[in-house]
Image (cartoon, helix red, strand yellow):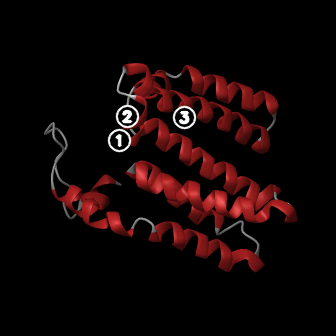
Amino acid sequence: FYWVKIFGDDTFTVRFPFVISSLISIWLIYQIGKKWYHELTALLAASAFGFLILTILFAQMVRMYSLGIMFSLLTVYFWTDLLFFSDKKNKNLLWWGWIISMSAALHLQYFSFLFVGLVGLSGLFFVKRNELLKYSFGGVLSLLTFLPEIPVFIAQMKVSDNGGWLGPPTKNFLPGFF
């Protein structure tokens, strides 16, 4: 809303933040892959992601998908550094980066919400015992930022989508899914 008010509503201006977020996502995949595996794997993963049709499509669409991917990857980036590669001098920056990026992903898309939630829960197996309380507090703090959206979430779960091809979930949806 404010972006359009400030910079105008031509096609390039409106799509620009989503293209940038897709490019940042490619860079984040490279950085995460380099930390988790090695540089060649990171380069292959970033290249594959950059040429996926959905990545290209999401970069052009003015929708939350590219931002959701970027903040989900940013969450993994900070999570990885926080739990496995951190030193004492930048630990607070990593904590706040993890909390803020996770909070942003929670608000953008429900799949991003689920993804960063699973990342956060899996971190419980890797976090050092003396940092467990701080880690749990960060996760709860991120969840608290979602509280104002719970009525919207409940309302959206009660109705089908606008196109009519996806009906509202039933009570036995989750067991039936598995």
Please state which of the two labelled residues, at mark 3 or mark 1, is closer to the viewer.
Answer: 1
In the rendered image of this protein, does residue 139 appear above or below residue 77? below
Viewport quadrant of the N terminus: top left
- Left-right relation of 114 to 155: right
Badge 2 element: helix
Q: How busy is the neighbourhood of tag 1: few (under 14 within 10 Å), some, or many (20 plus)?
A: few
Please say if the residues under marks 1 and 2 sit with CB atoms less than 8 Å apart: yes
Marker disc for residue 4: 2
Expressed as whole percent of the image width and height from the top left, the position of residue 178 reads 35, 55
Say which label, 3 or 1, has the lower sequence index.
1
Mark yes or no: residue 78 visible: yes
Which residue is drawn at the image coordinates 72% and 53% (left, top)? 80
- Residue at mark 1: 1
Amino acid type for the residue under numbered disc 1: Phe
Q: What mark, if any, has residue 21 been given in the picture?
A: 3
Look at label 2 and name its amino acid: Val
Q: Position of residue 49 (x, y in %)?
A: 58, 27
- Residue 61 placement (x, y as % from top left): 38, 27
Mark 2 surroundings: few (<14), some (14-19) or many (≥20) residues within 10 A:
few
Residue 18 lies left or right of residue 45; in this view the side is: left
Describe the element under mark 3 as helix, strand or loop. helix
